Image (cartoon, grey):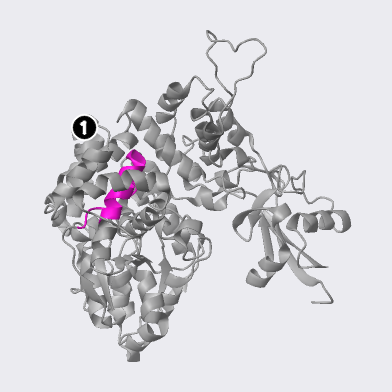
Amino acid sequence: MKLAYYPGCVAQESGKELDMATRFVCRALGIELAEFPSFSCCGSGFVDEANEVLNVAINVRNLALAEKAGLDLLTICSTCQGMLSLANLRYQDPKVKERVDAALRPLGIEYRGTVKVKHLLRVLTEDVGVARLQEKVVRPLGSIKIGAFYGCHLLRPADELHWESAEEPHAFEDLLKAVGATPVYYRGRVMCCGFPIQFVKPSTASQIAGRQIDDAKAHGAEAMATPCPLCHISLDAYQNQAEKAVGHALDMPVFHLPQVVGLALGATPEQLGLARHLVPVDAALAKMTAPVASR
Amino acid sequence: MTGNTVHATFDIYRFDPTHDAQPRYQRYELDLPPHTPILTAILKIRAEADPTLTARYSCRSAICGSCAMQVNGKSRLACETQIGPELARDGRIVLEPMRNQKVLRDLVVDQEPFWRRYDEIRPHLILDPTKPMPEGKENPMTPTEVERFRETPRCIACAACYSACPAVEADPEFPGPMALAKLYRFVVDPRDQAHQDRLVRIQTGGLWLCLRCHLCTEACPKDVRPSERIRDLKEMAIAVQGGTEAGSRHAIGFKENIRERGLLNEMKLVRQTSGLGGLVGQAGQGMRMMRKKPEILKRPHPIEQLDEVEKIYEALDRKEAPP
């Protein structure tokens, strides 16, 4: 399987550990990643707020690059996934298409709308498949209780994204079971992490993040995992702010999705950049990697 | 199942704040056809088993918006949700009042804040008194103008969106999805004379606290799609005023930021949104992150064929002063 790799901004910058883990997992599963140094940012929802048609156009440019290479596109961020999927959809509106085409045609860019945008979670659960993934596991993760945290733009609006149920998704939990973890079901798993207003009103953003972590914890989660690096920023890098907002310690290790899979496929913590997290993952890691005999 | 009925277990939230120290869940068991609406089941329980069970309802036809509640944790109109699929999936039916509103009794919540936020957006046409309508004439709209309302006139004010919204939950400053969807309806109304004033007011009235999480759009039983109309309001507010608030500055800053290199320059964005003061305010957080993630100090490499991005901006973007 070969896919056009769309790492997004964060995984190339402060969230580099997500890129490292993705590359490990794809190598281990025989997924070939084609690099596109001319991919631009997806706009992260902010460009969409400022100028919807511009946002569609920059993403259609990205999609056209993948189409020219004859590849579907792999995302590793819920927000990139949402923005690129919605660009595919909005481009079908004749009024939008006319304006976007007028901007792209002089650049020799054409898009026929054939590229499928797939998040790593979907590639792992559908294209690789849970059963095959399970066969590749060399280190089942010790039944550690993990709260999946999906990220809004992977799920909603469900009638436009055409994938999981927005209210009761199960792909991430299926994946967690396949790698030997125990998924935790809690309301917050489909809620918002607060990231979009982190710079608008930090106290409210942190309050929202804190509530979801509290909810995961109340349901027994020993760690959380997310397919979105923006959620990861809210839940991990800003967890100290969330603690202030909710008024108590949270101490919740938060993994990127491919880090969890990578551990089960035999990666070392160094290969997955686990030391780059703000909240230490040591206790969870010990449980996930303990020799089977000692469990 | 017996004949054409199913055995239904209901666990219903009961709370009378004037008497009870704690809410409790009361179990009711009854046999009903699987297509029975939940509201019908509630009325049957009330008529035959427990007249004290309190719920709000009126039309029973998904038009009045009175009977919104949480059915197995999800916002639903009780009158249009059948028991069969709920039982098949969850084995029982848990009924709870809507979230983000004070419980008055059992399944009935206090809607006063919800309606107050609605009143605050001035949900009526504001006309220019110096331009009275010609005697005996109405104020006609073309079909194209009516299309601009999108789905917003469908709203039945059931408050399912208000109940689902994490911004409402965390911050009383946020007016809620319904009030903003209604505001949109007046902003695009060609007869209304206060478009600009409405947009200017909402910029400081909580518009930018919307998380665009789309939970409202998912919860809405009438497909009003509040989150998408809130997006429209944000773009219109920027067009009228530019970056006057942290939210609009952030959106504009982000847009200009990726124009420069094609990828986000994280450090610069903080400065663009929060100014130098904000950068100082975020300094402690920045230091913590830098120790683990030194890349945040570096500017990203420009993407290849960056000139294409620039040309797309030139073709499609308004000229805006940088925030």
Lateral position of residue B213 relative to residue B40, left or right = left
The residue carrying mark 1 is: B322
Q: Residue at x 63, y 70 (%)?
A: B89
Percent x, y of residue B21: 67, 49
Percent x, y of residue B87: 69, 69
Depth check, front residue: B56 or A221: B56
Q: Residue at x 82, y 58 (%)?
A: B45
Place residue A115 in its image quadrant.
Answer: bottom left
Place residue B311 in its image quadrant.
Answer: top left
Report the label total. Answer: 1
Place residue B292 in its image quadrant.
Answer: bottom left
In the image, residue A166 sits, relative to residue B54, either above or below, namely below
Q: Quadrant of the C terminus of chain A?
A: bottom left
* Magenta region, residue range: A39-61
Secondary structure type for disc 1? loop
Of all residues, the one furthest to the bottom in this rendering is A293
Residue B4 appears in view: yes
Percent x, y of residue B282: 23, 42
Q: Quadrant of the N terminus of chain A?
A: bottom left
Of all residues, the one furthest to the top in this rendering is B130
Residue B170 appears in view: no
Q: Let me know if residue B210 is in the magenta part.
A: no
Depth check, front residue: A68 or A165: A68
